[in-house]
Amino acid sequence: MFSFSFNALLSRITAFFETPQSPAPLGFFRIAISLFCIVQALLWLPDWEAFLGKYGWIQWEISRALNNPWEVHIEHISQLLGWFGISEENSIYVFFWVYVGALGLVTLGLLTRIFAIVAWFLHIVIMASIPTFFYGLDIFIHIALFYLMVFPVSKAWSLDVKLGLVSPEATWGAGVAIRVLQLHMCFAYLSAGVGKIWNYEWWNGDILWYSMTHPFFKSLLDMHWVADYPFIPMFLGWWTLFIETLYGIGMWIPRVRVFWLFNMIALHAGIAVFLGLWLFAGIMILLSVSAFGHECLRDLKKRPKPIQKRSVA
């Protein structure tokens, strides 16, 4: 009996990961993430020299001292480009356009894996060169770029398919990639939710009140009036704990999956509007939609349409 149950469980786990799936969600993931990174880079461009220049906000000597000796720094890239006669001032812009160009080719799906590796490596250099500026947004971007490097993301909506370099057929590899992304998001939100549960300020609403009214955050709305209605931030805090902590359960139940994804999008839209963290909200929405959006669409298509009563003449 135990052997039978164990074999049945093993078969279910194997089927869960290795059942061939359409690579379309991975194609969406590739295009969405690479375009998002291009938008972020273009937003950086006006201050690029201040970010990565030798005498920018954090000078190279200081940022190098904050790193491990084995990390690749923008100064190393500048020295490499110097062998080709490119000055320190111009090297950071050459670096920028190579990064954006690699992301553009990933978006188009041309030699996708090669240029995904290039984009991932250059993002490592960016993070190592401005260690005091990156936060959760950049970590999630770096994880997403790593997934672009190892997942079969060129199997859908790519020039690689048009040129016959890869097959667009559903494979077990696409299934494994989609499951890994889904499980990653479940564990990420479980960790976030459990971490918030132990903070009493999430239960009484104080942390949301401080966040919505603190001048550090750039809220689009004046939220000081919420002080007269303390139940609002309290309810929003409970709602956040509920949606994040149980994300890993709700997203696997077809009857409530659409509800959960909608609420997760609403949660991050609120972060964008009330805290001004538009890029962070954007990357988290794209990751959730990439992971579960195709299953939510499938659930919506399966829902029975309401029967229309015929009028009696």
Image: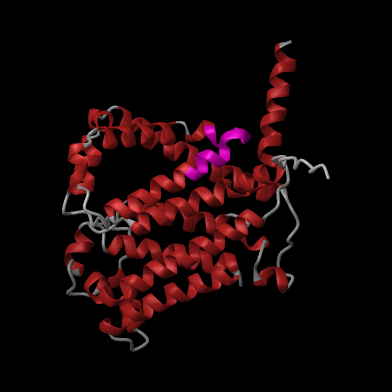
Residue at screen point 28% across, 29% down: 203
Q: For the magenta stretch, what is the residue range?
A: 250-262
* Foreground residue among 234 and 171: 234
Residue 258 inside the magenta-drawn segment: yes
Where, quadrant-wise, is the C terminus in this rendering? top right
Q: Is residue 222 left or right of residue 187?
A: left
Image height check: is 263 above or below 94? above
Q: Quadrant of the N terminus?
A: top right
- For residue 166, side relative to residue 28 (left or right): right
**Above or below 166: residue 3:** above
Residue 266 placed where, x, y %?
Answer: 43, 47
Q: Position of residue 216 (x, y in %)?
A: 18, 54
Q: Residue at x 24, y 28 (%)?
A: 200
Residue displayed at 30% across by 70% down: 74
Q: Residue at x 55, y 68 (%)?
A: 106
Q: Nearer the viewer, residue 126 or 181?
A: 181
Q: Name the chief secondary structure element in magenta.
A: helix
Q: Position of residue 206 (x, y in %)?
A: 21, 35
The residue most toward the front is: 313
| Residue at the bottom extreme of this rendering | 85
Q: Quadrant of residue 109?
A: bottom right
Residue sitting at the far right: 313
Any part of residue 48 in sight? yes
- Viewed as shown, does residue 151 lie left or right of 264? right
Q: How is the image coloured?
A: secondary structure
Please tell me whether residue 269 is drawn above or below residue 122 in the rendered image. Answer: above
* Res. 184 visible in picture: no
Count of numbered tags: 0
